[in-house]
Image: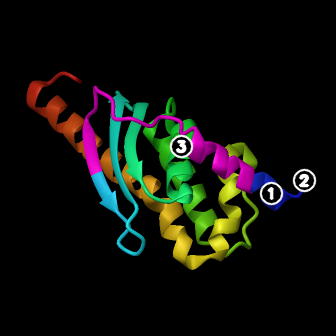
Protein backbone atom coordinates (compact mmCIF):
# COMPACT_ATOMS: atom_id res chain seq x y z
CA UNK A 1 0.00 0.00 0.00
CA UNK A 2 1.45 3.39 -0.94
CA UNK A 3 1.40 6.46 1.28
CA UNK A 4 -1.32 8.25 -0.70
CA UNK A 5 -3.65 5.26 -0.35
CA UNK A 6 -2.95 5.11 3.38
CA UNK A 7 -3.70 8.82 3.73
CA UNK A 8 -6.95 8.43 1.77
CA UNK A 9 -7.91 5.55 4.04
CA UNK A 10 -7.27 7.66 7.18
CA UNK A 11 -9.39 10.51 5.80
CA UNK A 12 -12.23 8.16 4.84
CA UNK A 13 -12.13 6.47 8.25
CA UNK A 14 -12.46 9.81 10.06
CA UNK A 15 -15.23 10.83 7.66
CA UNK A 16 -17.22 7.61 8.16
CA UNK A 17 -16.60 7.44 11.93
CA UNK A 18 -16.08 11.03 13.06
CA UNK A 19 -14.63 11.61 16.51
CA UNK A 20 -16.37 14.23 18.63
CA UNK A 21 -19.35 14.70 16.30
CA UNK A 22 -22.62 15.85 17.82
CA UNK A 23 -23.17 19.06 19.76
CA UNK A 24 -22.73 18.63 23.52
CA UNK A 25 -23.05 20.66 26.69
CA UNK A 26 -21.53 22.28 28.64
CA UNK A 27 -19.70 24.76 26.44
CA UNK A 28 -18.33 28.28 26.76
CA UNK A 29 -18.53 29.22 23.09
CA UNK A 30 -20.33 28.15 19.94
CA UNK A 31 -19.50 29.34 16.43
CA UNK A 32 -20.87 28.68 12.98
CA UNK A 33 -18.54 28.80 9.98
CA UNK A 34 -19.29 28.36 6.30
CA UNK A 35 -16.95 27.81 3.39
CA UNK A 36 -18.66 29.91 0.71
CA UNK A 37 -16.68 28.34 -2.14
CA UNK A 38 -18.11 24.86 -1.62
CA UNK A 39 -20.95 25.21 0.91
CA UNK A 40 -19.37 23.20 3.75
CA UNK A 41 -20.74 24.26 7.15
CA UNK A 42 -19.83 23.61 10.74
CA UNK A 43 -21.27 24.56 14.11
CA UNK A 44 -18.60 23.97 16.72
CA UNK A 45 -18.63 24.20 20.51
CA UNK A 46 -15.68 24.44 22.87
CA UNK A 47 -15.69 23.57 26.55
CA UNK A 48 -12.73 24.72 28.62
CA UNK A 49 -11.82 23.61 32.09
CA UNK A 50 -9.54 26.45 33.10
CA UNK A 51 -6.94 26.51 30.35
CA UNK A 52 -7.57 22.91 29.26
CA UNK A 53 -9.73 22.03 26.26
CA UNK A 54 -12.18 19.57 27.84
CA UNK A 55 -14.38 19.06 24.80
CA UNK A 56 -14.78 20.03 21.18
CA UNK A 57 -18.16 19.05 19.76
CA UNK A 58 -19.57 19.85 16.36
CA UNK A 59 -22.26 19.34 13.77
CA UNK A 60 -20.99 19.53 10.20
CA UNK A 61 -22.23 19.20 6.64
CA UNK A 62 -19.87 18.99 3.76
CA UNK A 63 -17.16 17.06 2.03
CA UNK A 64 -15.12 14.25 3.49
CA UNK A 65 -12.07 16.50 3.85
CA UNK A 66 -13.76 19.12 6.03
CA UNK A 67 -15.47 16.56 8.23
CA UNK A 68 -12.46 14.25 8.57
CA UNK A 69 -10.21 17.20 9.38
CA UNK A 70 -12.51 18.26 12.22
CA UNK A 71 -12.53 14.69 13.54
CA UNK A 72 -8.71 14.74 13.59
CA UNK A 73 -8.80 18.14 15.31
CA UNK A 74 -10.93 16.61 18.07
CA UNK A 75 -8.39 13.83 18.61
CA UNK A 76 -5.46 16.25 18.69
CA UNK A 77 -6.90 19.09 20.78
CA UNK A 78 -9.12 17.61 23.50
CA UNK A 79 -7.15 17.25 26.72
CA UNK A 80 -4.48 19.75 25.71
CA UNK A 81 -4.10 23.23 27.13
CA UNK A 82 -5.04 26.13 24.86
CA UNK A 83 -1.41 27.03 24.08
CA UNK A 84 -0.64 23.46 22.99
CA UNK A 85 -3.79 23.47 20.87
CA UNK A 86 -2.77 26.70 19.17
CA UNK A 87 0.67 25.25 18.44
CA UNK A 88 -0.97 22.21 16.82
CA UNK A 89 -3.21 24.54 14.81
CA UNK A 90 -0.13 26.45 13.64
CA UNK A 91 1.54 23.19 12.58
CA UNK A 92 -1.57 22.07 10.66
CA UNK A 93 -1.95 25.52 9.07
CA UNK A 94 1.70 25.43 7.96
CA UNK A 95 1.13 22.00 6.41
CA UNK A 96 -1.97 23.21 4.58
CA UNK A 97 -0.17 26.22 3.11
CA UNK A 98 2.98 24.27 2.20
CA UNK A 99 1.74 23.39 -1.31
CA UNK A 100 2.57 19.74 -0.66
CA UNK A 101 6.23 20.50 -0.01
CA UNK A 102 6.15 20.45 3.82
CA UNK A 103 7.13 17.25 5.57
CA UNK A 104 4.51 16.90 8.33
CA UNK A 105 5.58 16.18 11.91
CA UNK A 106 3.75 12.95 12.74
CA UNK A 107 4.55 13.34 16.45
CA UNK A 108 2.53 16.58 16.49
CA UNK A 109 -0.14 15.97 13.84
CA UNK A 110 -0.70 12.20 14.16
CA UNK A 111 -3.55 11.40 11.69
CA UNK A 112 -3.38 15.03 10.52
CA UNK A 113 -0.45 14.06 8.31
CA UNK A 114 -3.02 12.45 6.01
CA UNK A 115 -3.95 15.93 4.81
CA UNK A 116 -0.48 16.61 3.36
CA UNK A 117 -1.78 15.80 -0.13
CA UNK A 118 -4.70 18.20 0.24
CA UNK A 119 -2.23 21.11 0.37
CA UNK A 120 -1.52 20.50 -3.33
CA UNK A 121 -5.09 21.53 -4.19
CA UNK A 122 -5.72 25.20 -3.31
CA UNK A 123 -9.49 24.77 -3.60
CA UNK A 124 -9.48 22.11 -0.88
CA UNK A 125 -7.31 23.89 1.69
CA UNK A 126 -10.28 25.87 3.01
CA UNK A 127 -12.17 22.59 3.40
CA UNK A 128 -9.39 21.11 5.54
CA UNK A 129 -9.08 24.30 7.61
CA UNK A 130 -12.81 24.95 8.18
CA UNK A 131 -13.07 23.14 11.53
CA UNK A 132 -9.68 24.43 12.67
CA UNK A 133 -10.61 28.06 12.03
CA UNK A 134 -13.94 27.49 13.81
CA UNK A 135 -12.04 26.01 16.77
CA UNK A 136 -9.67 28.99 16.89
CA UNK A 137 -12.64 31.40 16.82
CA UNK A 138 -14.54 29.45 19.50
CA UNK A 139 -11.51 29.23 21.81
CA UNK A 140 -10.92 32.97 21.45
CA UNK A 141 -14.54 33.63 22.41
CA UNK A 142 -14.41 31.13 25.28
CA UNK A 143 -11.28 32.75 26.69
CA UNK A 144 -12.93 36.18 26.59
CA UNK A 145 -16.05 34.78 28.28
CA UNK A 146 -13.99 32.98 30.92
CA UNK A 147 -11.80 36.00 31.67
CA UNK A 148 -14.80 38.36 31.87
CA UNK A 149 -16.55 35.92 34.24
CA UNK A 150 -13.44 35.86 36.42
CA UNK A 151 -13.15 39.65 36.33
CA UNK A 152 -16.81 40.22 37.25
CA UNK A 153 -17.00 37.62 40.03
CA UNK A 154 -13.43 37.45 41.21
CA UNK A 155 -13.64 33.65 40.95
CA UNK A 156 -12.66 31.45 38.06
CA UNK A 157 -15.61 29.68 36.50
Judging from the image, what secondary structure is the residue with disc 1 in? Answer: helix
The residue nearer to you, when weighing 60 against 81, is 60
In space, the residues marked 3 and 1 are separated at their CA atoms by: 19 Å
Q: Cβ–Cβ below 8 Å for labels 3 and 2?
A: no
In space, the residues marked 3 and 2 are separated at their CA atoms by: 24 Å
- Where 26 falls versus 142 (above or below)? above
Q: Residue at the location (40% across, 62% down)? A: 40
Q: Neighbour class for label 3 at 10 Å: few (<14), some, many (≥20)?
A: many
**Residue indicated by mark 2:** 1
Counting residues from the N terminus, which is met first, the one under dot 3 or under dot 2? 2
Q: Residue at the location (57% across, 47% down)? A: 15
Judging from the image, what secondary structure is the residue with disc 3 in? Answer: helix
Q: Residue furthest right?
A: 1
- Where 50 falls versus 124 (above or below)? above
Q: In the image, residue 57 lies at what x, y percent?
A: 39, 36
**Residue indicated by mark 3:** 71
Span colored in magenta: 8-31
Residue 37 can be seen, yes or no: yes
Q: Neighbour class for label 2 at 10 Å: few (<14), some, many (≥20)?
A: few
Q: In the image, residue 44 lies at what x, y percent?
A: 34, 45
Q: Residue at the location (56% across, 78% down)? A: 122
Q: Quadrant of residue 97?
A: bottom right
**Residue indicated by mark 1:** 5
Counting residues from the N terminus, which is met first, the one under dot 3 or under dot 1? 1
Amino acid sequence: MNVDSLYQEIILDHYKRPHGAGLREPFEAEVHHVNPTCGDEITLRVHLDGNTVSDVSYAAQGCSISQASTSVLNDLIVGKNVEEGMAILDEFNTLMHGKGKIEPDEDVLEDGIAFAGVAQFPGRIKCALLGWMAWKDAVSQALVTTSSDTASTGDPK
